[in-house]
Amino acid sequence: MGCCILEGYEGDVGAVRTALELLGHVSSEGGPLLIIDFSAARNWTGVFGDKQDYQRLCDRLEASVENHGASVEVGGQSAVAWDMPTGTADIWRRSEGSVVLCRVWQPVAVDRSEYFAALPQRSDAKRLGKVAITGGWLVILWAAESGAEINTEPKNGKALDLSVGGAGLVAAMPRGDYVCYHDEIVEGQQSAQRCFVTRQN
């Protein structure tokens, strides 16, 4: 991982930080997170059933390991898998049409998630794919889980406790097409892997 790159960024990092809203957290016990439209998520079977969605996704990610993610079609809609290392990602809203998933490594008792979430996307960020949001709700889900278990009314920042607690989260997002990018930042003993989900103009 390289140093933080701010090239091409015009604006005040402090202003972005002020606008940030912590929506919640998504945890995994290993394997990628799925970034998907709320209605399409119900077609995802994860490790359950005989569709083998999760195994096919892992095979695809293994073939493109350097990209840290891959696009996938679920229920006829485009979605993205982000190959986040095991642990918990904080989900921050940066604007009405943008969220960032932030997986931070830091010394104990030091919380730098908001700081890393506020930093601009690196100029060398890797494009992972597109997500189509048709109903105004985005789901971020540990991909091993089944989306069929999401049988609740959507609510901004709602945590989804499925086979394990905190395995998913719902975020309100305007309808449209979104692009996902992966980047990494290292500052001394602290580092972060991030996935930006940003609406296309």
Image (cartoon, rainbow, N blue to C red):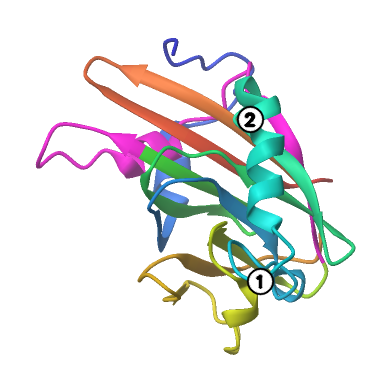
Is residue 115 shown in magenta?
yes
Q: Nearer the viewer, residue 180 or 41?
A: 41
Q: The magenta stretch spans which residues? A: 104-133
Left-right relation of 123 to 159: right
Q: Nearer the viewer, residue 124 or 45?
A: 45
Residue 198 in sight here: yes
The residue that appears at 30% across and 17% down in the rendered structure is 187
The quadrant in which the N terminus is found is top left
Of the two numbered discs 1 and 2 on the same chain, state the one appearing first in sequence.
1
Q: Position of residue 157 (x, y in %)?
A: 48, 71
Query: How many discs appear?
Result: 2
Q: Secondary structure at mark 2?
A: helix
Residue with the most extreme top position: 2
Residue 150 is marked as none
**Disc 1: which residue:** 49
Q: Nearer the viewer, residue 46 or 41?
A: 46
Quadrant of residue 171 within the rendered picture: bottom right
**Disc 2: which residue:** 62
The residue that appears at 43% across and 42% down in the rendered structure is 102
Q: Secondary structure at mark 1?
A: loop
Quadrant of residue 183 within the rendered picture: top right
